[in-house]
């Protein structure tokens, strides 16, 4: 793997706290995560986050009673599960003030026969409006975009927030890689913990899967499966979201997306420096500028600490560039309101 390309960040590695620091931490405000949108993805994410018990959660939605009811229901599971942080529901952005991370799940969901591109216009308006409110009340937050088409919506959030690109990212490879890993584990009849995958490019039909970055116990699947099997698994991963939409009929996936977004949020809050493929705003990395695609990044305090150079071959770079061009076409069609 090549030398990582570094995005500037205010991140500092922390030493072990002194006794005085521990006492001081007791008086610091608790970590706060806002989830915008109390639908299937948002509510599931709120539940996953609060059950990890490392941050308070605000579940926000424009529908009166919806976030309050779901948050209260989740909160009442605390005595059973043993989490001590609080989850609250609200219709006011004022209650989200001072959030460390804000996850945007709000927006129209895909229905059968609808592509992510079909969502572009309506979700541009929603994500732009939500992002401006987040920036107003939580100017130091890290934003994670889940709304589709996620690459273009991440670009919208970058523009609307005015934040450094290191503090805005989208859900892509964390979910796409999980789907591919699931299919590989099923095919090989191994635990999913034995499988590791990097999926890059657009979160959509031009998703980029380089089989050499998919391994079982460190061994590339190119040394385990035939090309026909690999092609089948890759195609299923590319169509992973559509497959679930087709089965559910009236909604889209939410369990796996909420788990993937939760993993990203936790990496930021816990300052884990974990490498996870995410949709990132590129400025020269991989030879690409002015676009957003999924690439491996190191996540921690402050958001994206590094964009990792995967060491692509010339042929692989060309494939990634083609995927980026598809996203660029979406971005070029967006008209942002002032």
Image: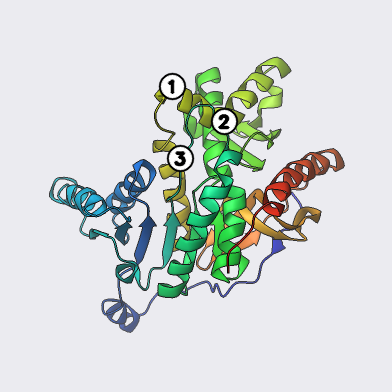
Give the farthest residue toward the right.
314
Determine whether label 1 and label 3 are within 8 Å by CB: no
Task: Please tell me how crowded label 2 is: few (under 14), some (14-19), or many (20+) other residues with Cα within 10 Å.
Answer: many
Cα separation, mark 3 vs mark 2, equals 22 Å
Indicate which disc, 1 or 2, sits on the residue closer to the N terminus: 2
The answer to whether residue 274 is visible is: no
Give residue 323's position: percent from left, percent from top: 73, 41
In front here: 54 or 207? 207
Secondary structure at numbered mark 3: loop
Residue designated by label 3? 109
Left or right, residue 7 beside residue 74: right
x and y percentages locating residue 158 in the rendered image:
59, 63
In the image, residue 138 above or below residue 317? below
Q: Is residue 184 left or right of residue 332?
A: left
Q: Residue at x 43, y 61 (%)?
A: 102
Q: Is residue 187 left or right of residue 134?
A: right
Residue nearest the observer in this picture, 2 or 259: 259
Tell me, for residue 180, which label it has, or none: 2
Of the numbered discs in the image, which one, if any, rests on residue 190?
none
In which quadrant will I find the C terminus?
A: bottom right
Is 234 situated above or below 161?
above
Q: Which image quarter: residue 282?
A: bottom right
Per the image, label 1 sits on a secondary structure element best described as helix
Residue linked to disc 1: 247
Q: Secondary structure at mark 2?
A: helix
């Amino acid at each position: 793997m090549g030398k990582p390309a570094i995005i500037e960040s205010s991140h500092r590695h922390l030493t072990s706290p002194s006794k005085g620091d521990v006492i001081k931490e007791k008086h610091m405000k608790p970590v706060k995560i806002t989830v915008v949108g109390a639908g299937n993805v948002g509510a599931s994410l709120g539940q996953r986050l609060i059950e990890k018990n490392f941050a308070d959660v605000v579940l926000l939605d424009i529908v009166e009673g919806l976030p309050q009811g779901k948050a209260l229901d989740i909160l009442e599971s605390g005595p059973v599960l043993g989490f001590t942080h609080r989850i609250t529901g609200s219709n006011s952005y004022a209650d989200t003030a001072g959030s460390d991370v804000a996850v945007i799940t709000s927006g129209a969901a895909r229905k059968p026969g609808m592509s992510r591109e079909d969502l572009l216009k309506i979700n541009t308006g929603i994500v732009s409006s939500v992002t401006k409110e987040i920036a107003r009340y939580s100017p130091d937050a890290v934003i994670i975009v889940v709304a589709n088409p996620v690459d273009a919506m991440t670009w919208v959030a970058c523009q609307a927030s005015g934040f450094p690109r290191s503090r805005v990212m989208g859900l892509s490879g964390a979910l796409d890689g999980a789907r591919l890993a699931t299919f590989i584990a099923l095919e090989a009849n191994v635990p999913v913990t034995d499988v590791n995958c990097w999926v890059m490019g657009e979160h959509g039909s031009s998703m980029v899967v380089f089989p050499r970055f998919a391994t079982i116990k460190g061994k590339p699947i190119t040394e385990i499966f035939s090309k026909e099997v690999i092609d089948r698994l890759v195609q299923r991963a590319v169509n992973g979201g559509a497959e679930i939409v087709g089965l559910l009929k009236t909604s889209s996936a939410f369990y796996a997306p909420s788990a993937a977004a939760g993993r990203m949020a936790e990496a930021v809050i816990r300052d884990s420096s974990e490498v996870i493929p995410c949709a990132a705003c590129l400025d020269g990395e991989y030879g690409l500028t002015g676009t957003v695609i999924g690439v491996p990044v190191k996540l921690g305090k402050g958001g994206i600490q590094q964009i990792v150079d995967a060491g692509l071959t010339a042929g692989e770079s060309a494939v990634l560039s083609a995927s980026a061009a598809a996203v660029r076409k979406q971005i070029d069609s967006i008209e942002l309101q002032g």
